[in-house]
Amino acid sequence: MIDVEIKTYHATLHSPLFYSSSEGVLVSADRILGSTALTYALAYTLGLLEKRYFLYGDEAFNHQYHELADIGLFVSDARPIDVSFKEETFKSTEYLSERSLTVTVPSGAGGEKGDMGRFTKTDPRWMSSDSPASIKKVRRYIGLAPGSTFEFTVWSKESLPDDLLLTLGIRRSGELRVKKTKLANKVHLNLYMLKEVYGIGDGSSGDKRLNLIDVYNASEKLVRGSDSRKQHLLDIDINFCNDKIIPLILG
């Protein structure tokens, strides 16, 4: 085992978290928080990556995660402990982007605003009319509700804080408070991250150090999602990670 710091965090969601696990008229979130989002959130918060607000060309619609391989972090998926869901309906002024979320249809009785009512039209007056924006799309979002709790583990070359506030999800509106807890015995890992970001292969190249079949055999279950990034290997012993996976990724 190489010299890295390992911490398990208990995470509590303090605002609704909306992200796309399956899409259509209904956009739904999963119970498991993927390590792609968690790794980016940690990297931004710890100053390991600079936020890029504008993407061009192929990157604008076909994002690559290879930059995560060199930041000195390895993050497990977040195992759900106590999760509930919340539904909101958004109106948007564009078909192709969620950047233009403008109106939340009131949720609850009495016409009260939904929890995401802060999504309003923000264009400067000199760039657009004061008239109401024309609505191009209406979509229902099922997200993770405040109070939902998770657990995930982080391996780092540098010292990690015991208490952090992370933001993630659509418009980075989900506020996740994470606090150090007892080191987990087992973790969930993301198959996409292992293969596409960290280069752990399927064994066909002849590399006998470690392949995905070894990781699969060490897990209790493989959960497949609607997207390649939503494939999770559940309940892998942390000692297997320390001995077999971490030296390849952070060595």
Image: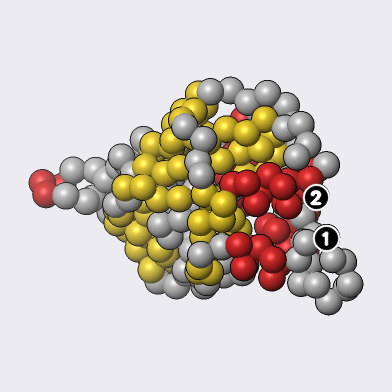
Nearer to us in this view, 203 or 142: 203
Residue 34 image point, x, y percent: 54, 54
Is mark 1 in CB contact (under 8 Å) with mark 2?
A: yes
Nearer to us in this view, 199 or 251: 251
Find the residue positioned furthest to the left. Answer: 110
Q: Which residue is mark 1?
A: 209
Say what secondary structure mark 1 lies in.
loop
User: How far apart in space, not on screen, are marks 1 and 2 (Cα)?
Assistant: 9 Å
Say what secondary structure mark 2 lies in.
helix
Q: Is residue 235 visible?
A: yes
Query: In this rendering, is residue 175 above or below 204?
Result: above
Q: Residue at x 24, y 43 (%)?
A: 113
Find residue 30 and report its image quarter.
bottom left
Counting residues from the start of the chain, the first of labels 1 and 2 encountered is: 1
Find residue 51 and report its image quarter.
top right
Q: Which residue is mark 2?
A: 248
- Left or right: 64, with 147 as reference point: right
Within-10-Å neighbours for mark 1: few <14, some 14–19, many 20+: few
Residue 198 image point, x, y percent: 77, 55
Within-10-Å neighbours for mark 2: few <14, some 14–19, many 20+: some
Mark in the foreground, 1 or 2? 1
Find the residue positioned furthest to the bottom. Answer: 204
Query: In this rendering, is residue 16 above or below 191?
Result: above
Q: Amino acid at mark 1?
A: Arg
Q: Residue at x 37, y 59 (%)?
A: 141
Query: In this rendering, is residue 5 above or below 188?
Result: above
Q: Residue at x 68, y 57 (%)?
A: 193
Q: Is residue 100 visible?
A: no
Q: Residue at x 63, y 46 (%)?
A: 239
Residue 244 image point, x, y percent: 73, 52
- Left or right: 29, with 113 as reference point: right
